[in-house]
Amino acid sequence: MIQMKGQEAVNQAYYVMNNKDLFRDGSFFTIERETLKEPVTPERALADLKSGTLRIDELTCEILSVWDVLLLAEKDGRLAIHPAQNVVLIFNHVHGNEVKKGIRAFVTPISAFEAAVSWAMQCPVIEQDHDFDKFILNLRPGMVLRKEAWKEKGELLRYSFEIANELMRIFELDSPAIWENLIKRDASLCAEDEPPIHGGILLDEVLEKIRCSHPCSPPILPLENGLSTSEKSA
């Protein structure tokens, strides 16, 4: 929530009154006195200010931030955010490549994610669906999660081991079995003079296993397994 007090809260009351269709339930006003803390509508707050029964410094306001919308989206399963060491995996139903029926995903560098989170925590909600999409767009350019995408994007190859390991954890895949299948499929990968299996090959194998995995595999984990403790408390 974004906190406002005094003149800022008054300005917000005027803004809400002039944009009722946009804000609906996104702003919460309160009269705060020594022995009183009372919810109030923006209409009544402005009327009381005009009549002199309310002082400017007695009005406070809390506004939903875009971050609050994202927390709600993660709670109801429309979004899942999984940070790794250098990247963040974003699961949703609209943006990114489909990794499993109904589940889309993409990867973004952690620096881009942190910048988008900072914006979301400071930006008041105007229209929830629009604000959700704007947050996703702030994470661009992302890395597409589809087979052989690493051939086109070097950054995806650079972090492919990290992404593959995180996907195996999220979807509860059998990591030793995946490695064993990779080695059996091409014995030359084990030869002394051959380069080791690179992350792009592993990532492709993991994406294929996710696509074919049992529908009960958890594509999106609950909030406590996604955001870090510091991010949740913020």
Image: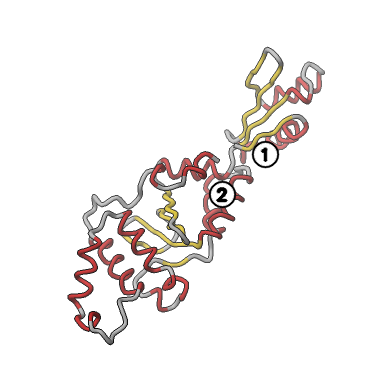
**Closer to the camera in the image, 35 or 92:** 35
Please give the name of the residue rendered at 31% of the width and 82% of the height, measured from the top-left corner. Answer: 195
Residue 31 placement, left or right of 162: right
Q: Is residue 177 visible?
A: yes
Marks 2 and 1 sit apart, C-alpha to C-alpha, by: 16 Å
Q: How many marks?
A: 2
Above/below status of 7 relative to 117: above
* Residue 224, horizontal then vertical, whole percent: 40, 42
- Mark 1, Cα crowd under 10 Å, few <14 / some 14-19 / many 20+, is few
Please give the name of the residue rendered at 26% of the width and 52% of the height, measured from the top-left corner. Answer: 217
- Residue 85 found in image quarter: bottom left
* Residue 209, horizontal then vertical, whole percent: 25, 64
* Residue 119, horizontal then vertical, whole percent: 61, 50
* Residue 134, horizontal then vertical, whole percent: 56, 54
Q: Residue furthest bottom?
A: 193
Amino acid on which disc 2 is placed:
Asp
Please state which of the two labelled residues, at mark 2 or mark 1, is closer to the viewer. Answer: 2
Residue at the spot of label 2: 131
Residue at the spot of label 1: 19
Amino acid on which disc 1 is placed:
Asn
**Closer to the camera in the image, 18 or 60:** 60
Residue 46 placement, left or right of 93: right
- Mark 2, Cα crowd under 10 Å, few <14 / some 14-19 / many 20+, is many
Q: Quadrant of the N terminus?
A: top right
Q: Quadrant of the C terminus?
A: top right
Q: Is residue 134 visible?
A: no
Above/below status of 66 relative to 4: below
**Closer to the camera in the image, 49 or 140:** 140
- Secondary element at image label 2: helix
Q: Are marks 2 and 1 in contact (CB under 8 Å)?
A: no
